[in-house]
Image: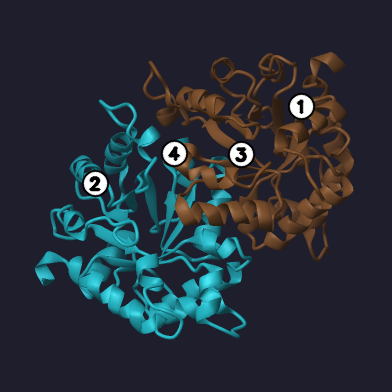
Chain colours: A brown, B cyan
Amino acid sequence: MVRSHFREQMESSWERSGGFLCVGLDPDLERVRERMPGRERPILDFCRAIVDVTADLVCAYKPQIAFFSACRAERDLEALIAYIHASYPGVPVILDAKRGDMGSTAEQYAREAFERYDADCVTVNPYLGWESIAPYRSYGGRGVALVCRTSNPDSGWLQEFPREDPMYLRIARAAAERDEGDLMLVVGATYPNQLAAVREAAGDLPLLVPGVGAQGGDPAAVRRCAASNGRGLVVSASRSIIYAGGVADFAEAARASARRLYEKVRIPAHA
Amino acid sequence: MVRSHFREQMESSWERSGGFLCVGLDPDLERVRERMPGRERPILDFCRAIVDVTADLVCAYKPQIAFFSACRAERDLEALIAYIHASYPGVPVILDAKRGDMGSTAEQYAREAFERYDADCVTVNPYLGWESIAPYRSYGGRGVALVCRTSNPDSGWLQEFPREDPMYLRIARAAAERDEGDLMLVVGATYPNQLAAVREAAGDLPLLVPGVGAQGGDPAAVRRCAASNGRGLVVSASRSIIYAGGVADFAEAARASARRLYEKVRIPAHA
């Protein structure tokens, strides 16, 4: 498949879906087994079922690699991403891996994300500097989402240091300067002031915003941080959608939960 | 196997080996295939051969996970670590993964490192804060090596910011304060002044020091940064050892290269 450049792919996907919703695929093996009894590949079957009931609502999917690698399910992740590309072409897959290393090691991580898994974009930790990000960018046309300001309680320790010129804004400004249509920034919804500050620092760079689901971030506050064309946001929720229901109704409940969040993060022009 | 606490394991390993040498296992598939023609599991066989010719010289091994995951060789990594534990009990395995995420995702990464791969220690990126490191520490007795000051050219961008109170020293001080015998710091050998500054900031915390091999860091400068008991260093080289030779002599050449570096990073009391 010839794929368009990541930014163009996102713009088409926002256009098609009319919203910012991204479903995070974090298949915790214990919970998934309950919902998929007797299956040989419960993780793959569960994730495919979630994708099938949400694909018309999303602008992207975000599988989290740790949930696959903790239980030896790499083959399921490969098959899942291939399934999304084949069944819902044009829906970008952002592999959440938060890799961060240098030189030949970074090249191997880029190969993992883009060749092995065929992701459209991968999350990367920028702590090792721009040289460490270059190998991902040399896969012409794929995206790189840089971890900027995360949604967890203790995240300010380094990210907001020093107060007068915090790390996360330094990253945001540098990403905006260096963007070639391939960069995004990961910014949690749980700190709305910092999210707004990133939007200000980063111009129209797309923001990948987790934390509106189980972590309680406010979708309305996130929507106010759209780019100047009214787009530029990927709002990700995982647990609040994929585990919204019980064992028997997980798929319908996931769709209903995704639908509710979709309505809260519709793109203004379409609202 | 009942394993001792990570710090005790390291102390025993320094005592046994008499040196700081750690061999990094970065099995680039193309190079490995040349050296292991016709093998069904070239990566596993190559790494085992390297281990067999260096085990008496090392205080630890450091497999880099990207080299396995880029080419679907997770099973080889599992088998390699099991092989080291079974054949050379007491030699710690530091899984170089530089993971960094939060909450339930960090729990999955910890499970990957310590349950799936049975590593003794894992490298972790501290950019998400202490809360993101807690899940690794709750595996009583395993080690966590925090990325502090890396050896690559562009690493100062965030790590040395701000000049007057740089990030990497903030991490070093905090790690020393919070250590419970489980923490290390990753500090590249290519910036000897910063390495010395970390030693000063972090007291006797063990330092994992890559960059003395292909990257050209000076082993003598590194040795001067031992802890007050004359130990406290894990000096890692990968490419300069494992690819020291050609196709036919890779094992002997690896041993010879490891031996040369071993002599340069012997523990003073044993020298």
Q: Which residue is mark 2?
A: B195
- Disc 1 is placed on an element classified as loop
**The C terminus of chain B sits in image quarter:** bottom left
Q: Which residue is mark 3?
A: A144
- In the rendered image, residue A84, in percent from the top left (x then y), is placed at 82, 48
Tell me which chain the residue with mark 4 is part of.
A
- Residue A197 appears left or right of B152: right
Look at discs 3 and 1 and give the one toward the viewer.
3
Q: CA distance from mark 3 to mark 2?
A: 30 Å
- The structure residue drawn at horizontal position 55% and vertical position 52%, both measured from the top left corner, is B109
Tell me which chain the residue with mark 3 is part of.
A
Q: Which residue is mark 4?
A: A129
Amino acid type at mark 2: Leu
- In the rendered image, residue B187, in percent from the top left (x then y), is placed at 31, 49
Amino acid type at mark 1: Phe
Q: Confirm whether residue B158 shows in the render.
A: yes
Q: Earlier in the sequence, mark 4 or mark 3?
A: 4
Look at discs 1 and 2 and give the one toward the viewer.
2
- The structure residue drawn at horizontal position 79% and vertical position 26%, both measured from the top left corner, is A261
In the image, are marks 3 and 2 on the same chain?
A: no
In the image, are marks 4 and 2 on the same chain?
A: no
Where is A265 relative to B262, above or below?
above
In the image, are marks 4 and 1 on the same chain?
A: yes
Q: Which residue is mark 1?
A: A20
Q: Earlier in the sequence, mark 3 or mark 1?
A: 1
Look at discs 4 and 2 and give the one toward the viewer.
4
- Residue B226 appears left or right of A102: left
Look at discs 4 and 1 and give the one toward the viewer.
4
Amino acid type at mark 4: Gly
Q: CA distance from mark 3 to mark 1?
A: 18 Å
Amino acid type at mark 3: Val
